[in-house]
């Protein structure tokens, strides 16, 4: 299974180091073999190399080696830390920061070419969910436009926009149905994200076709994230 933590705009360089040390000690002590991914903010990136299955990734980057792109980081800055994992297409980047599907596809192609492990996010807003599964799938599949879904190092995260950071989790039936439909189109590991917490981790990980979780808010506390990793271990 894949258990991923998205810090978003939380944690500092110092608190990320404390977090990573604690998480690495936990992974070691519990002999965790699940894939554990952590996406800290760009200022907290560093050469974190503990175990092959505990990896740090970037939440975003600009699809260039280096150059004049004020405020962005490129491949050169990421590679300094040996990082080879990236989150692409997160709904906050799509809907708050206005990243278009075209820009996202460019980013995807660039980091695929560079051999990155890509966690690619899709998910529908509330008004689309209310129209039913056909609309939900049409929306989600449109977010694969320009994306090579056969890329070997690809993980898909299904994160309904209305469930992110809202405390509203999609129902198990909604998750199962959507993941089942997605699986017909993309033969890659599927994660669910959207208000996952310790209390619902087990039931979500037990859903058919759910191979992991992408956790925001509940991952910011290292003890609660470790607990979710422990739950995944018990299930596998
Ligand atoms: P949340 O965020 O767990 O706070 O809902 C999930 C995500 O955005 O990846």
Image: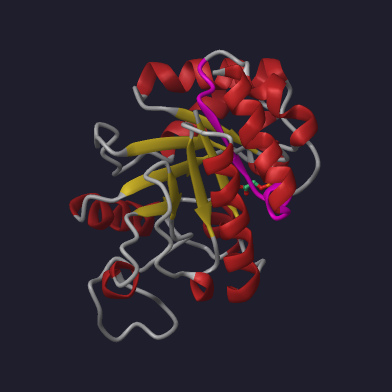
Q: Quadrant of residue 229?
A: top right
The reply to whether the magenta stretch includes residue 219 is: yes
Q: Quadrant of residue 102?
A: bottom left
Residue occupying the point 50% across, 25% down: 211
| Above-or-below relation of 19 to 145 | below
Q: Position of residue 178 (x, y in %)?
A: 56, 21
Q: Nearer the viewer, residue 86 or 15?
A: 15
Q: Would you say 58 lies left or right of 172 here?
A: left
Residue occupying the point 55% across, 67% down: 41
Q: Position of residue 8 (x, y in %)?
A: 61, 61
Q: Would you say 12 lies left or right of 190 here?
A: right
Start-end of magenta stretch: 209-221
Can residue 7 be seen here? no
Residue occupying the point 46% across, 50% down: 89
Figure quadrant of the C terminus: top right
| Above-or-below relation of 236 to 213 | above
Q: How is the image coloured?
A: secondary structure
Q: Position of residue 137 (x, y in %)?
A: 51, 26
Q: Position of residue 233 (x, y in %)?
A: 58, 26
Residue occupying the point 28% across, 68% down: 79
The reply to whether the magenta stretch includes residue 102 is: no
């Amino acid at each position: 299974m894949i258990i991923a933590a998205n810090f978003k705009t939380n944690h500092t360089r110092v608190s990320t180091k404390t977090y990573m040390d604690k998480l690495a000690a936990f992974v070691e002590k519990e002999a965790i073999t699940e894939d554990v991914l952590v996406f800290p903010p760009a200022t907290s990136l560093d050469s974190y190399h503990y175990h092959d299955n505990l990896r740090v990734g970037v939440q975003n980057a600009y699809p260039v080696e280096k150059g004049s792109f004020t405020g962005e980081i490129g491949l050169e800055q990421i590679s300094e830390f040996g990082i080879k994992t990236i989150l692409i297409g997160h709904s906050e980047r799509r809907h708050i920061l206005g990243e278009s599907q075209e820009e996202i596809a460019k980013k995807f192609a660039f980091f695929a070419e560079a051999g990155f492990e890509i966690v690619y996010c899709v998910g529908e807003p509330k008004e689309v969910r209310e129209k039913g599964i056909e609309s939900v799938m049409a929306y989600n599949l449109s977010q694969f436009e320009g994306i090579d879904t056969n890329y070997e190092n690809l993980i898909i995260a299904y994160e309904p926009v209305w469930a992110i950071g809202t405390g509203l989790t999609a129902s198990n039936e909604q998750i199962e149905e959507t993941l089942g439909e997605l699986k017909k189109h993309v033969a890659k590991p599927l994660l669910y994200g959207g208000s996952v917490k310790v209390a619902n981790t087990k039931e979500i990980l037990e859903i058919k076709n759910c191979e992991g979780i992408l956790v925001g808010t509940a991952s910011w506390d290292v003890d609660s994230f470790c607990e979710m990793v422990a739950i995944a271990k018990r299930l596998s």
